[in-house]
Image (cartoon, rainbow, N blue to C red):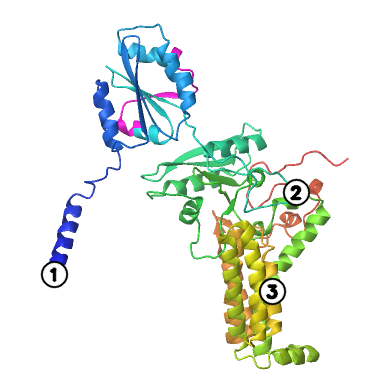
Amino acid sequence: MKERGDKMVRRSFFRRNKKNPSSNQKENFTIELGNELEKNLTNIKNMLDDAEDLIIRHFTSGSHKLAIVCLEGLVDKEFVQTHVIRNLQETNDDLSDPAQTLDVFFQKMISLTSIKYAQSLDDISYGLLSGNTVLYLNGIDQVLILGTSGGKTREIQEPVSESLIRGPRDGFVEDIQTNISLLRRYIRDPNLRFKSHEIGRRSKQKLVVAFMDGITDQDLVKEVNRRLETIDIDFAPESGFVEQWIEDSFLSPFPQFMNTERPDKVSAALMQGKIAILLNGTPFVLTAPTTLGDTLQSPEDYYERWSVSSLIRILRYLGVFISMFLPAFYIALVSYHQGMIPTKLAFSIAATREGVPFPSFVEAVLMGITMELLREAGARLPQSIGQTIGIVGGLVIGDAAVRAGIVSPIMVIVVALTAISSFTYPAYSVAIAFRMLRFAFMIAAALLGLYGIILLYIAIMIHIANLKSIGVPYSAPFSPTFIDDWKDLVIRAPITLLKNRPVTTQTRDKVRIKKENS
């Protein structure tokens, strides 16, 4: 009987919510303002449920009753007191018409750069929640929305996720206006354009698409804006939501957008004809289109001499190869192709594996998962502790596993080389993709040996050849082949030889170095 009663209560509850799904919440407020000050203030209180951080300040200016409304922590209160309240209290203009009085406030009394009129509660709510101050005047159905956003924000600091030995030390922050100003400082060109969007039915966050007019292909800009306009979500706290919504293939492990905290990296991408997507509330900016070669490049490659940068890039490509294929090759050779191992090395491996109860695949998977757990634990712990946990944990667990006879010493060496090589990836999203593929290659090697590795490699190459980033082939400049772009792929040619922008992005202005070498 009790269970039946519970079901009836649940059905009754769902019926009530189905009939009136928005009884407790309203998504927008289109109530027009009235002439009575107190009634307008009551409406704003009801909208925010008389929130604790709602500030309402009553005062007079001449014979007129006024009130300012703002939210604690989102506005610069000292700025409001100095440039709004003080100016209005000291005014000598005493006009009888409230409309003329509001115009006088707009034109003469309020010393702010951003002021606009509003007449609906929807505009007022958006202004308040954006950190603005609303000025009410009794006797008129209009308000002034004052640009006084401020409050405490994180200062510009060096990016944590992309540390460089040589290069700028500033990084993006969570405030989008600060991020736009950082790009302006790097690119002092009037052709730098910013196209604004609003995403989030409830959060109403500001999103900006940045591009270089005269360089970036306009078809690319139109396509990005078209995809952004299709976003229909109530809340997007991070740019990863945007990336997952507008990417070409959500099934691909490869990132089709590059995310970065570095203004210099975004500026360089813009000058190459790419677009950047900035979202308010996150320091991570997206750049596109992206190719496979872009995922293995670092801003530091251009700050060092070409010979040093080329060597570092070659080591980076070598690290990617080792981290992806070394465990799989070990499994394939030990399990299927023992004849391909040199005789002395084969005897050495056989001796170290004597007494190990698991096949090489299980061995590799156990150690691989252990290293991934240590890596993830080290990333989530405080920085000073995380590095220690990763190093000490790896040494202790590896030594204990060898002593217990669970894994062989050669397996510990293979996993250690794989882990060290994986640290050469310049971006976290790229590292995740290759770490996933490493386990896929290990499974292929356990099933079919070297043939499985080759078949999976061919399948991945077919996938990359068909993958696109905002319509641009992910495999470029290999396929389609753009020979001129090879000068900045594996080998980074001297700066003086990089005269043209990448052909991949189909830029309108293709030349970036016009001065001939002397």
Q: Are marks 3 and 1 in contact (CB under 8 Å)?
A: no
Q: In this view of the protein, which residue sits in the foreground, 163 or 425?
A: 163
Q: Amino acid at mark 1?
A: Lys
- Dot 1 or dot 2, earlier in sequence: 1
Q: Which residue is under mark 3? A: 416
* Left or right side of 504 for 239: left
- Dot 3 or dot 2, earlier in sequence: 2
Residue 166's disc is 2
Q: Which residues are magenta?
A: 108-124
Q: In this view of the protein, which residue sits in the foreground, 267 or 67?
A: 67
Secondary structure beneath label 1: helix
Q: Position of residue 278 (x, y in %)?
A: 53, 44
Residue 66 visible in this rendered orientation of the protein: yes
Residue 291 visible in this rendered orientation of the protein: no
**Residue appearing at x 56%, y 59% in the figure:** 468
- Structural distance between the alpha carbons of marks 3 and 2: 28 Å
